[in-house]
Image (cartoon, rainbow, N blue to C red):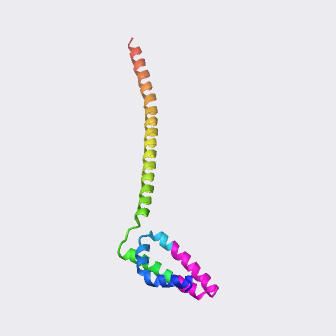
Amino acid sequence: MSAIDYHIKQAEEKGQEWVEFLATYPDKRLVKRLAIIRKQLRMAAENKDEKGYELMLQWEHITICARMHKEEFNIPDSLIEQENKNQLLETEQETSNSLSEKRQEIITEILNEKQLPQKKQKLETDNDNQLSLF
C-alpha cells in the first residue's frame, strides 16, 4: 500500500473525527485551508494524479463539513486560539487605556494653561481696580 493510499484510507475511516477537530479552528483558518486544498486539487488534475486528486477531494469534503459543523453547533475556536485572541484584546485595551490616560493628561495641561492666563488677567484687573481707589 502506497503512502497516498494509506492517507485516503485514513481520511475515509477518521473523517468524522477530523471534522470535529477541524471545527475547533477559527473559520478564517478553515477558509485558508480550503483555498490551499483547492489549489492542490487543480495541481493534481493538471498532473493527472488520480490518487492525489481523490485525497484532495476527501480533504475538501472534510474541511467543508468542519465549517458546517462549526456553524451548526456554534463551536468556539480552540482554547489556544481563544487565549491568543484574549491576549490580543488585553493588549489593545492596555494600549487604549494608556492612550486615554495620555490624552487626559494633555487635556488637563491645556486646560490648566488656559486657566492660568485668565487668572493672571483677573489679578491684574483687580490690582488696577484697587489702585484706582487710592
Q: Nearer the viewer, residue 22 or 118?
A: 22
Outermost residue, top side: 134
* Left or right of residue 3, residue 125 in this image: left
Q: Which residues are magenta?
A: 32-56
Q: Nearer the viewer, residue 51 or 48?
A: 51
Q: In the image, is residue 48 above or below residue 105? A: below
Residue 67: image quadrant is: bottom left
Q: Residue at x 42, y 51 (%)?
A: 93
Quadrant of the image containing the C terminus? top left
Q: Residue 116 appears at what percent x and percent y?
A: 44, 29
Outermost residue, right side: 47
Q: Residue at x 39, y 74 (%)?
A: 70
Q: Residue at x 63, y 88 (%)?
A: 48
Outermost residue, left side: 73
Is residue 55 covered in magenta? yes
Q: Residue 123 appears at what percent x and percent y?
A: 41, 22
Is residue 78 covered in magenta? no
Q: In the image, is residue 125 above or below residue 23? A: above
Quadrant of the image containing the N terminus? bottom right
